[in-house]
Image (cartoon, helix red, strand yellow):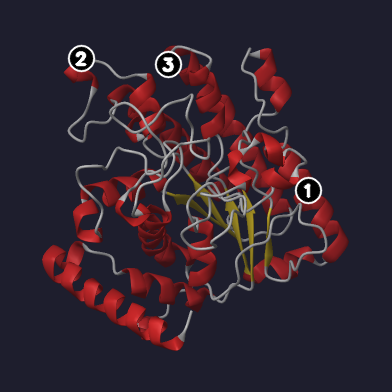
Amino acid sequence: MAPTRVCLFLVVVIGSFYLIRAQMGSSFPPLLRAFSTLKSCNFDKIYQLGDSISDTGNLILESIEAATPFGFLPYGESFFRNATGRCSDGMLMIDYIAMASSLPFLNPYKKVDEDFRHGVNFAVAGATALPVDVLTDWNIPSSVTNSSLNIQLDWMSTYFNSVCHPDCAEKHRSSLFMVGEIGGNDINYALAQGKPIEEIRIMVPVIVRAIKDAVLRVVRNGAIRIVVPGNFPIGCLPVYLTLFQTNNSSAYDQHNCLKELNNLSIYQNELLQLAIKELKQENPNAMILYGDYYNAFQWLYRNAQYFGFDTESLQKCCCGTGGDYNFDFAKFCGGLGVPVCKDPSQRISWDGVHFTQAAYKVMASWLINDILPQLQCFQSSVY
């Protein structure tokens, strides 16, 4: 970006920041301050496990590029001007977290001979918390990838054995580990199979147990700062607003999201927070934090107008077509003739399942402000 454009960008952002803050008062967590203060943690590496919310290219490198739209435009159009395997029009939350830490974007593990000096992204779009064979036993097929959480952990262990064994614990003292978001696809696939909510609720403790076990493996690898994100309010996603659309007004909350599905996310997040509490008690030398993606989204949704989002299209896809939510299972983003909105920065949903770069930026800001004091690397000088 040319210096003139950079200066103009900063003027616009800073001006907007003060205008928005004046309108919203002290409740507004400033984005610019959030993205600068994380530098005080002095992270030199970030390691990411997860699914499409954080995959920076592993899925499209698994020899199935032709089977997924994420390796082609319009994915990546807003920032990279090319598809990178990120399931968005541009950057993801992990990209903003890396920027906030003054680190480069994380390269995907599957990218051979890549630079991993500042961390590795093991996340794979479509991945599940539970192994594929466990889901198969429950008659829940997972056709996107076999690289579930346990596989990603094996990759991580293999990688660490090759670069830092036996001194990993010492080298990880300045590393940030992101375990998730993961587990959302286990629920997504069950819902796609038509499983009733009551049956899916029975699955949730098993999903959370798998995440807890994953965190334990990460701790054993020497991690001391770990963030474990929860799930988003899935009842606000166009994919489910379309799939479960009803004329029964009582099925929707004040934001026109599906209450039953959001309650499922709340249940999952509550169990995850209990698991994290247990993990912290069992591992007092590790900082294991809950990443509150649910409330990050809710905060974005409630204040969308102040960030320039089109309030008339908060539940409509940018890349998609059909119905009340611009979403059609037969005409998914990236398909032939599927349109893209003129300005993705005005939409929250990118393709009905994933969010836009603009939405991820706001949610990343909220998350950083939420976890920063708990990371115990806060410096008063940033104010």
- The residue under the point 21% across, 36% down is 255
Q: Dot 2: few (<14), some (14–19), or many (≥20) neighbours within 10 Å?
A: few
Three-letter code, disc 1: Trp
Quick one: 236 or 7, which is closer to the camera?
Answer: 7
Q: Name the residue carrying label 2.
A: 248
Mark 1–mark 3 distance (CA, rounded to whole Å):
33 Å
Q: Name the residue carrying label 3.
A: 197
Quick one: 168 or 305, which is closer to the camera?
Answer: 305
Q: Is residue 10 above or below residue 284?
A: below
Question: Residue 280: image x %, image y %?
Answer: 54, 50
Tag count: 3
Q: Is residue 308 visible?
A: yes
Q: Dot 3: few (<14), some (14–19), or many (≥20) neighbours within 10 Å?
A: some
Label whose residue precedes the other's in the sequence (1 or 3): 1
Question: Residue 195: image x %, image y %?
Answer: 49, 12
The reply to whether the C-beta atoms of the residues labelled 3 and 2 are less than 8 Å apart is: no
Quick one: 280 or 156, which is closer to the camera?
Answer: 156
